[in-house]
């Protein structure tokens, strides 16, 4: 029994572009690895049951709830956290900047998950309708905004990204 408790799994994974080689307990969640192991506390801890979205990250570009993702299963995966979105010089990602400009949040607790979910949405659909935005944000709970400002922010972010792509093509 003692041996079982001491078992660890060797894991290589890339977090925000940086390769990490770690020994982790088999039942460690990705959320605990990010927050306690790597000090990336921008990934928030909420319900711990996969329902609130506060802990959302991207795993290989797809939205995932890190509280219910066992870290040991993520060998060689690429994780993106909210800390990894801005440029190294601190320039915010266009989605972060737009949420800021549009006052998309109040307390901001849901912000990392909302922003990362928007990253995935706009990669798949660069001009989503209100309904499509609400559907995409369905797994992320906000206790403050009533979602109007969030939907407005996602639409504005989509417009900004489309505009910058058009400018780049001209
Ligand atoms: S803390 Fe992971 S979904 Fe709520
Ligand atoms: S802004 Fe407070 S939880 Fe969303």
Image (tube, rainbow, N blue to C red):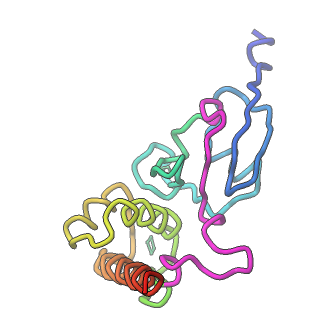
Q: Identify which residue is drawn at 61% across, 39% down.
A: 29
Residue at image position (57%, 55%) is 45
Check residue 3 for magenta coloring: no
From this viewpoint, which residue is outermost toward the bottom? 101
Front-most of residues 64 and 148: 64
Coordinates of residue 167 in the picture (x, y in percent): 44, 87
153 on left or right of 68: left
Q: Residue furthest front?
A: 170
Instruction: Give how far across and how far down residue 56 sits, in percent.
Output: 50, 55
Q: Is residue 90 above or below residue 77?
A: below
Tell how many labels: 0
| In-front residue for pair 95/142 | 95
* Residue 7 located left or right of residue 98: right
Q: Quadrant of the C terminus?
A: bottom left
Is residue 153 positioned above or below 56 on the image?
below
Q: Position of residue 163 (x, y in %)?
A: 39, 85
Relative to 6, is 94 on the left or the right? left
Which residue is pictured at 35% across the width and 55% down the height? 139
Q: Position of residue 48 (x, y in %)?
A: 51, 46
Q: Is residue 63 above or below residue 144?
A: above
> Where on the picture, by quarter, is residue 160?
bottom left
Q: Which residues are magenta?
A: 71-97
Residue closer to the observer: 161 or 31: 161
| Residue 79 part of the magenta-drawn span | yes
Q: Quadrant of residue 124?
A: bottom left
Location of residue 84 with respect to 164 vertically, above or below: above
Q: Quadrant of the N terminus?
A: top right
- The residue shown at (67%, 74%) is 87
């Amino acid at each position: 029994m003692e041996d079982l408790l001491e078992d660890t799994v060797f894991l290589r994974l890339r977090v925000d572009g940086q390769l990490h080689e770690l020994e982790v307990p088999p039942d460690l969640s990705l959320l605990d690895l990010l927050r306690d192991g790597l000090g990336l506390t921008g990934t928030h801890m909420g319900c711990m049951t996969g329902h609130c979205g506060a802990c959302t990250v991207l795993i290989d570009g797809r939205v995932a709830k890190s509280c219910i993702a066992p870290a040991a299963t993520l060998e060689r995966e690429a994780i993106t956290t909210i800390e990894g979105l801005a440029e190294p010089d601190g320039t915010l990602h266009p989605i972060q900047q737009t949420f800021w400009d549009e006052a998309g949040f109040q307390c901001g607790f849901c912000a990392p998950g909302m922003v990362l979910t928007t990253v995935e949405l706009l990669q798949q659909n660069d001009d989503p309708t209100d309904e499509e935005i609400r559907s995409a944000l369905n797994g992320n709970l906000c206790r403050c905004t009533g979602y109007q400002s969030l939907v407005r922010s996602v639409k504005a972010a989509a417009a900004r990204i489309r505009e910058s792509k058009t400018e780049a093509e001209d």
